[in-house]
Amino acid sequence: MDAIFKEFNRLSKSSGFAKCEAQVDSFLETLELAKTAITKDPQNVAKYVREMKIKLDLIASKITEYEKEIYSSIAKYGKSLDKTFRLDLSSAYNPKMFPISPNDDLNRAILVHFARNGHFDIAREFMDETHITIQTSLLDQFSIMYKIVQALNNEDLGPAIEWASTKRKELLELGSNLEFVLHKVQFTRLVLGSDDIAIPFNYARKNLSVFGDRYSNEISRLMCSTLYRKNIERSPYQDIFNLPSYEKLAWMFSSEFCFLLGLSPESPIYLAVTAGSLSLPILAKLEVLMKSKKAEWTTTNELPTEIPLPKSLVFHSIFVCPVSREQTTEENPPKVLPCGHILAENSLKSMQKDHISHSIKCPYCPTETTVAQAKRVYF
Ligand SMILES: [Zn+2]
């Protein structure tokens, strides 16, 4: 890595850029001077053009010379990058293990990603090229969402509060506290920003009373915190003023907005690309190791190694049957026995085959049971 930083510093400090810029400036200056001279003395156009051409040729040759200096630094930087990150991405892709069936699902997911992130022009272009469409009503919803996100990014809470109040019932059913959080941020802004204490009080009276049942303690603390507004840092209410950033509020809002539309809080494409990028070095290394051992993956849809991902990218546990040592799938789901032990369905079925009697014994405790009594579990 040191070599990369060294070359990057050399490139960023290269005097070639400044020298080129100065030459381009004098190029423009020469043109301007020639223009003025020709305007003043139109009889001698040929003479001025000749003089100008000599000067410009000289400048152009200097620019070429300085460019060489820049290109040499860029090439050295590129080489140090290639040397440090010797990752052949194609080695991480094994088509046998990750079969891609040609269907529109991926394109649709890409389209929805563009739309939910407010790239409506790209989404329209994408629809034209792929002939895949999404409902106009969904596009309209994304447009509303994007406008509110933009307002939040501009520190304007109004549109988000208005939306949250119209969706109060649905948000309540979700167990969401978004509307209250938005009002809380607005209230604290008024406490810190107004000299007249009546302003936040009136805001609270008008907007917070509806939350009295659920957030009475928080509301009491909010009201008490106003007494310390000139000295928040040394008050017992300091924590109230550690407010979420507008970026975080925008994320909270868009997550809940998407949730009410039946979509995941984060874009599936974003998650897949992030998790995939983090997995690539491990997959590439794995492929190299397997090649050197002349081994091959034997199971599809299952990795022969665990890939550690950050918590934000882990959504559910993976269950491996303790009997067959196979990862459970939709076709071979995990089943819980009445005793609480869990096995894969195929393991239960093969145990049943081995028993002449209808009942089977749990491999981990003395309980006798039947396959029919086992219930599907979801992780
Ligand atoms: Zn058991």
Image: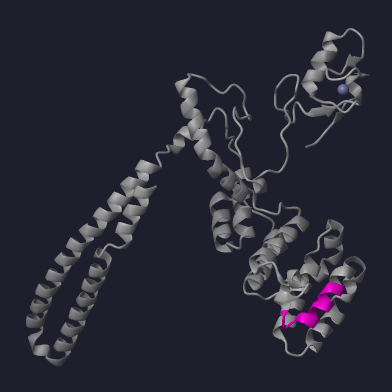
Residue 35 is covered by the magenta coloring: no
51 shown above or below 287: below
The image shows residue 111 at horizontal and vertical percentages of 60, 53
Q: Is residue 200 left or right of residue 138?
A: right
Residue at the (72%, 75%) spot, across then down: 234
Residue at the (89%, 15%) spot, across then down: 360
Image quarter of residue 105: top right
Q: From which residue to which does the magenta span run?
A: 220-231
Pick out the residue farthest to the top: 356
Q: How many marks?
A: 0
Colour style of the rendered protein structure = one colour
* Magenta stretch: helix, strand or loop mostly: helix
Residue 225 is covered by the magenta coloring: yes
75 shown above or below 13: above
Q: Is residue 270 left or right of residue 333?
A: left
Q: In which of the image's four quarters is ligand 1 placed? A: top right
The image shows residue 82 at horizontal and vertical percentages of 36, 43
Q: Is residue 132 left or right of residue 218?
A: left
Residue at the (35%, 42%) spot, across then down: 83
The image shows residue 127 at horizontal and vertical percentages of 58, 54
The image shows residue 210 at horizontal and vertical percentages of 89, 73
Q: Is residue 376 left or right of residue 279?
A: right
Image quarter of residue 226: bottom right
Pick out the residue farthest to the bottom: 40
Would residue 158 be visible to someone looking at this image?
Answer: no
117 shown above or below 28: above
Residue at the (83%, 84%) spot, across then down: 201
